[in-house]
Image (tube, rainbow, N blue to C red):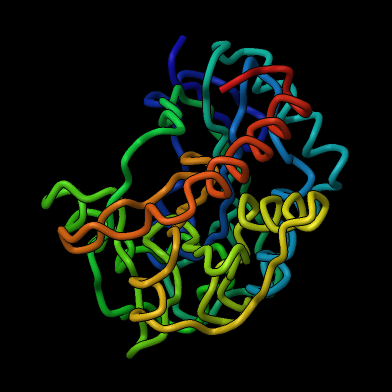
Amino acid sequence: MGAIGYFNGEIGELKKLKIPLCDRSVFFGDAVYDAVLVLNRCPFALDLHLDRLYNSCRLTEIVFSMPRDTLKSEIGRLLAEADVGETMLYLQVTRGVAPRKHEYPQDATANLIMYVSPIAVPPRDKRASLIRMEDLRFQYCNIKTTNLLPNVFAAQRATAVGATEVLFHRGDRVTEAAHSSILMLKNSVLVLPPLDELILPGITRAIVKQLCEENGIPTEERVFSVDELLNADEILLCSTTKNVLRVFEVDGQPKGGKDEALAMRIQNIFLDEVYKQTGVRV
């Protein structure tokens, strides 16, 4: 069927579904979202994604009253209609319908939008690349909102020059990428930027950190600089749609490649976890 969509209980062909013009997501991007890797209709790490979705609603004061079990049932209804294979489940909770006004009504009823569409998960040996860019986003990056125009500009610029992603930095501090987390390996330690208002709490990032700790790979959360990253033993990108990728190039210059064995081990233990939860090898 290809992409299929959902709006407040109605399921149909994505391009034929409609949302109200006065939904606040249309005028203000007043909505939060999440995205889940689905393999043969089996969502990976669904509970972690729903934790983040409900937390994003809390942080934005969007009153999303649908119980978690009901949301899971609605997701199941949608996935039952979806194609098998590699797909992505997108969920968006909007503040609801209201006359266009910056202040939001306290009694707005949230709307739920979902869709499932095919994706191509990149192979684990993809040679990922980055370009540096000053991070000009606002200071709510820890909330997964649909206010993504700076990310859109950054992703487009990276694509235009043939790069996989951007390397966002605020001054000399590395933050993340347009739609991925950036990690590094140094002296056999996985180093992650600390989670604050400048960093999205990535689900893949969290799983990678937990798996490393369970498998005896030391981890450390701390601020690190662009120069530190450029001199790291390995640079890793991770996200729902990328899984875990090694970065071989930044701004056209070769980087990383000094601890291939550990980088590949981290990739493998993560993909083993995907298989454990979904029964699918990617």
User: Which quadrant holds the C terminus?
Assistant: top right
Image position, residue 18 (x, y; %): 44, 35
- Quarter of the image for residue 232 reads bottom left
Nearer the observer, 89 or 197: 197
Q: Reply above or below: 45 against 86.
A: below
- The answer to whether 33 is drawn above or below residue 228 in the figure is above
Q: Foreground: 121 or 107?
A: 121
Rendered residue at 63%/73% (across/down):
60
Which x, y percent locates residue 189?
Answer: 62, 66
Q: Position of residue 128 (x, y in %)?
A: 32, 46
User: Which residue is pictured at 59% across the width and 34% down the height?
Assistant: 37
Residue 169 in the image: x percent, y percent? 35, 79
| Residue drawn at 52 percent across, 24 percent down | 87
Q: Is residue 127 left or right of residue 38?
A: left
Q: Establish if 3 lies above or below 55.
A: above
Which residue sits at x=31%, y=55%?
Answer: 165
